[in-house]
Image: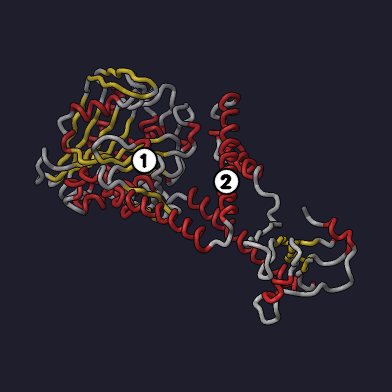
Amino acid sequence: SSLHLHDDGTSQRKRAKGHFVRLWVVLAWVAGLVAFTFWRHLWLPKPKSSDIPLHEFSEGRARVFLEELQSIEGFRTVGSKSNEELTPAWLLAHLHTFQQRCVAPCQLDIEVQRPTGAFGLDFLSKFQNVYANVTNIVVRVQRTTLDESSTPAILLSSHYDAAVGAGAASDDGVNIAIMLELLQNVVASETMLPSHNALMFNFNGAEETMLQAAHGFITQHPWKDQVAAFINLEASGAGGRELLFQTGSDILAMAYARGAPYPHASTIAQEVFQHGEVAGMDFAYIANGYVYHTPLDDISRIQQGSIQRFGENIQGTLAELFKDPAALHTINSSVRAHRHVFFDLFGVVTVTYSEAVGEWVNYLVVVLALVYCAIWSQLPWASKWQGVLQLIKMNALAFTASMSMAGLLLVLAPMSWYASPVTHLWVFIFPTVVGYLTVFPYSAFSYTVYVYSNSYSADCPKRLGLNHIYRNFSQLNLPDDWGMWINACDYLGLEPLRPAFASNSKWSHRLHAPAGPEAPITIFDNFPW
C-alpha cells in the first residue's frame, strides 16, 4: 500500500516562490563574494608622487630609479660590462649621495665585495658551483652610538643581474629601486633610524647564476655575523601584488601581520622553500608570470601602485620589528621551535598562528566529524561509508581529469596555460568539474531509506521505501507539485505507522489529500529525470 503527500496549488506556489527567493539570495551572495575577492586581488593603492617628504616611501621616486637602471646599456647578465661595471657605478653614485645626507647620529657604511668561492648544489642534479670575483654592494645603516660588530641587523636583499635575454625590470630591477627608496627614507630623518638595531642592504650582482653572490656574502663578508634576519625581495612575474610566501620565525610573521598595510601572504610554499638557520622572509611578484626571464619583462608590465604597496609593506614590517629592542636578539631561537601558518583575508588583515595550533584545529575537525557521524547523523553506517567512498571516487576522478589535461598540454603546448589566469578555467577547473560530474549520483532527488527490525512484528514494517517526488504537469496545463511517496515493502503495509501521522502529530500539517480529478496514468511519464 502507499500514501501520497502533496500540497494544494496555492500553498505550493507560495513555497515555490519562497524557494526561488532564497535561491537568488544565495546566488547573489556567492556572486558578490567572488566579485569582492577579484576586486581585492586586483586593487592597488594610489602611488605617491616624488614631491612628498623624503622619509615617506614614494613610488614616483622609486620609478625614477627603475627607469635609470633599465636605461643602462646592455643586458645585465653576470660577467657583462653592464652588470660588472656600469650598474655598480650607477648604484654607488646614488649610495654616496645618501651617505652625504646621513649625518649624526646616522652612520652609513658602504662596502663593495668581490668574493670567489665554490659550493655544492643539489638542484635538478648535484653539481659544483664555482664563481670568481662576483659583486655584492653592501650598505649598513645604524646609529653612531651602537657597536658596529655586535648590533643585530636586518638584511634586505635583491639582485640587479639578469637572466640571459631577460628585460629584468621586475626580476629584479624593481626591487633594487624599492631598496634604494627605502634607504633614502631611512637616512632622511632621525625618526626613521632604528634605535637599537642596524639595517643592511645587499645589492646582489650574481643571483641568476645559482645564488653565487649570496653565498659569497654569507660565507665571507665580515658583516655576516651581524645579520639576525633577512628580507629577500624577488619576482617570478611582473606587477600586481607581491606575495609573502615564506617566513622562518613567528616574530617575523607577527611583525608583518601588524605592520603591513596591504598584506598578501600564503604559507603554501613554506615547506618547500624553508631552509637554513637564519630567520627570513621571502617576497615575490607573481602576477603575469609568463614574462618571467623573457624580453617581455619591461617597465610597462608594472602597474601603478604595485611598487607603492610593496614599499609600504616592507617599511611597516621593519617599523614593527624595530619597536622591540630584544626582538632581533631572540629571533633565531624561534626559527624551528615556533613555525607559523599565515595567510591574508582579502588583503585586509593577516591571520597567523603556530603550527601546533593548526594541528589541534585539524584534530578537532576530525573529532567533530566522527562525533557527528556516530551520534547525530541518522543515516546507517553503510550509507555513511558509501558516501565517503563516493567522495574519494569523485576527488580521484577530478584530479585525474585535470592532470590528464595538464599532461596533454605538456606534450602538445608546454606552458600555454601560463599566458593568462583565465586559461586556468579550461585547463584545470572545467576538467575537474567534469571529473566530479562523472560519478555524481544522478538520483539526487530520489532515495530509499531502509529500516530494519529483528523480525516481522506489528511495531514496524520490515522495509520502507521513501521517494521525494517532483511532478511536472506542463502537458496538462496544471501547476507543478512535489511531495513524499512512502511505500511499505512487506505484508503489514503502513498500518504500524498510522499513529505517527495522527492529527495531533507534528507531521499532520504536512499531509494533504490529492486535490482535483484523478490524474491520468500518463502523468508518470513527466518526471524530469
Measured from the top left, where is residue 66 in percent x and y? 37, 35
Q: Is residue 276 left or right of residue 74?
A: left
Q: Residue at left 18%, top 29%?
A: 221
Task: Tell me where residue 28 appears, x and y as whole percent.
Answer: 61, 60
Q: Is residue 418 above or below residue 58?
A: above
Q: In front here: 227 or 82? A: 227
Q: Position of residue 36 (x, y in %)?
A: 52, 55
Of the two numbered discs 1 and 2 on the same chain, state the one appearing first in sequence: 1
Residue at (71, 60) in percent of width and height: 465
Considering only vertical position in the picture, is 254 above or below 219?
A: below
Query: Toward which corner of the image does residue 278 lie, by quadrant?
Result: top left
Residue where numbered disc 1 is placed: 270
Closer-to-camera residue (263/161): 263
User: Residue visible at 25% across and 32% down?
Assistant: 93
Residue at 44% in and 22% down: 165
Question: Which residue position is annotated with label 2?
Answer: 389
- Can residue 13 be seen at all in this image of the molecule? no
Does any portion of residue 216 appear in the rendered image? yes
Element marked by disc 2: helix
From what the image shows, is residue 418 above or below residue 388? above
Estimate how packed mark 1 is, as few (under 14), some (14 to 19) or many (20 or more) residues with alpha carbons within 10 Å: some
Q: Quadrant of the N terminus?
A: bottom right
